Image (tube, helix red, strand yellow):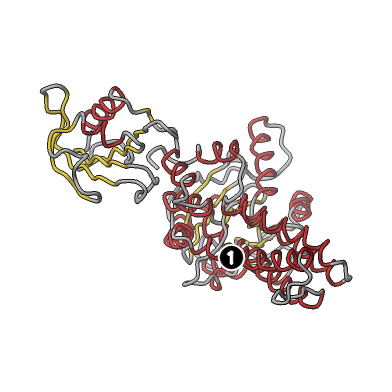
């Protein structure tokens, strides 16, 4: 990290301003070399300075330059932010001048990576900043903000503090048995401490499902035979004619998607091709995609025609979704009922008529019920939300349960201490106190260039 990096921190386009960010030991020196105004090396930190970016004697742009000096900056290094007039030509020209005067173009996420490596952000905070940038709903923004401001990290650090207290006391018991002031750790005392930690980790894991829903939304696959009303349902939910609707079976041959928000949670709606046996190659590809959606979706909305008896294809659909979280929609209730409802779970059935605009709100209410959307806390958004975080906590919960059982079985405390140490290390991986260089490089490449 000895070189000085620069990148455009804002989306390039026609706008009032763009911001170019520079970070590194020569950030002030390099910017000074193309800036006409106050000497940036002599100004007070945390000041905004008016002037011009120059190329030889030519004024390139009128700018405001913010100066942040190490270690009190975003990256922990000297940082410059150049506020330029918006537009591709001005912004790119100033970035070009910085690069020709000694800066290197920043890699995606490199500013945030430097903040992490310099101890300005831990890994949970860094991931939350990425989530904050990508947040699509108010709840996703609030959750990301809790992580970005360190609330999540504080929880994990408190658990690690409890573990290190246990570890240090056990170590003293082993190495200095004559030391009278140390707590003597017995299986009985350890039982209470480990139980508290295990329950805390289990609660974090349990709450993580809420975090994933808030961040990614719920993938809802709409499945059924051709012409049961899947595309009509999608159009009604989106309040637009997104999917083509005809009386001809097999009209939908590819996946049609849309998004709506309920209770601050995004529903990713996926209208699938009608599932049936067909000799049409194109339609068969669509049917195969529909079967893949069944495997991947968080929720299946299975639609059936009230005016027809269940066919073998209907029964195959019912069998294929039996292990999935499902809502059964019986459509066309405006027609004479011929369907046998005994094959369905009564509590999952909603009878609707899309033609008469009946039952749609019941479907949305059932989705809220299935995912407890009304119970997602409106004030506490301290949730884990990505696969890396959840995977580590799952392993921590599993290990804490093993420690708890070993202690119950009166395994020697000094032997249990080895697993307690491992649990402490795993929680360190969660916030990035322990990490692999290759993993960090790959992870930060996912972030946007200007951060």
> For residue 347, what is the image quadrant?
bottom right
Q: Residues within 10 Å of mark 1 (few under 14, many from 20)?
A: many
Query: On screen, 22 above or below 238?
Result: above
Locate residue 210 relative to residue 54 in the image: left or right.
right
Where residue 121 appears, as percent x and y from the top left, is: 46, 52
Instruction: Decide if residue 378 is in sight here.
Output: yes
Where residue 101 appears, as percent x and y from the top left, is: 28, 24
Q: Secondary structure at mark 1?
A: helix
Which residue is outermost to the front? Answer: 178
The residue drawn where x is 81% and y is 63% is 416
Locate residue 444 relative to residue 300 in the image: left or right.
left
The residue drawn where x is 72% and y is 75% is 183
Instruction: Decide if residue 233 is in sight here.
Output: no
How many marks are shown on the rendered structure?
1
Image quadrant where one finds the C terminus: top left
Where residue 427 appears, as percent x and y from the top left, is: 64, 57
Q: Which residue is mark 1?
A: 367
The residue drawn where x is 30% and y is 36% is 27
**Front in this rendered view, residue 200 or 140:** 200
**Front in this rendered view, residue 123 or 212:** 123
Query: On screen, 267 above or below 168?
Result: above
Image quadrant where one finds the N terminus: top left
Query: On screen, 446 above or below 409?
Result: above
Where residue 130 appears, as percent x and y from the top left, is: 46, 48
> For residue 184, what is the image quadrant?
bottom right
């Amino acid at each position: 990290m000895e070189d000085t990096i620069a990148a455009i921190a804002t989306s390039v386009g026609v706008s009032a301003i763009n911001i170019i960010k520079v970070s590194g030991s020569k950030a002030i020196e390099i910017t000074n070399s193309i800036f006409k105004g106050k000497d940036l090396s002599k100004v007070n930190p945390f000041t905004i300075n008016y002037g011009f970016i120059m190329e030889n004697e030519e004024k390139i742009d009128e700018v405001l330059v913010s100066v942040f000096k190490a270690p009190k900056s975003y990256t922990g290094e000297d940082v410059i932010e150049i506020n330029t007039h918006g537009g591709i030509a001005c912004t790119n020209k100033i970035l070009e001048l910085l690069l020709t005067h000694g800066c290197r173009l920043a890699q995606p996420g490199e500013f945030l990576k430097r903040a992490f490596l310099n101890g300005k952000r831990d890994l949970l905070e860094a991931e939350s900043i990425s989530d904050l940038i990508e947040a699509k709903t108010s709840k996703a923004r609030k959750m990301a903000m809790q992580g970005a401001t360190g609330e999540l990290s504080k929880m994990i650090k408190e658990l690690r503090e409890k573990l290190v207290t246990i570890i240090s006391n056990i170590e003293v018991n082993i190495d200095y048995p004559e030391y009278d002031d140390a707590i003597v750790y017995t299986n009985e005392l350890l039982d209470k401490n480990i139980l508290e930690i295990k329950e805390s980790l289990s609660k974090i894991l349990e709450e993580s499902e809420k975090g994933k829903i808030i961040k990614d939304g719920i993938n809802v696959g709409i499945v059924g035979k051709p012409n049961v009303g899947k595309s009509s349902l999608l159009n009604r939910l989106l309040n637009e004619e997104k999917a083509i609707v005809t009386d001809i079976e097999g009209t939908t041959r590819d996946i049609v998607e849309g998004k709506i928000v309920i209770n601050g949670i995004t529903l990713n709606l996926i209208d699938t091709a009608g599932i049936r046996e067909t000799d049409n190659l194109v339609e068969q590809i669509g049917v195969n995609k529909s079967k893949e959606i069944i495997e991947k979706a968080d929720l299946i909305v299975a639609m059936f025609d009230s005016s027809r008896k269940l066919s073998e294809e209907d029964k195959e659909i019912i069998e294929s979704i039996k292990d999935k979280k499902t809502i059964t929609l019986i459509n066309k209730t405006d027609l004479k009922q011929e369907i046998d409802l005994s094959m369905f779970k009564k509590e999952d059935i909603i009878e609707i008529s899309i033609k008469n605009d009946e039952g749609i709100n019941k479907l949305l209410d059932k989705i809220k019920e299935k995912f407890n959307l009304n119970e997602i806390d409106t004030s506490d958004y301290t949730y884990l939300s990505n696969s890396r975080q959840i995977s580590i906590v799952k392993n921590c919960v599993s290990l804490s349960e093993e420690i708890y059982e070993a202690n119950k079985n009166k395994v020697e405390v000094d032997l249990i201490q080895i697993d307690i140490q491992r649990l402490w290390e795993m929680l360190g991986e969660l916030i990035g106190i322990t990490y692999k260089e290759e993993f960090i490089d790959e992870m930060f490449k996912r972030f946007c260039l200007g951060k």
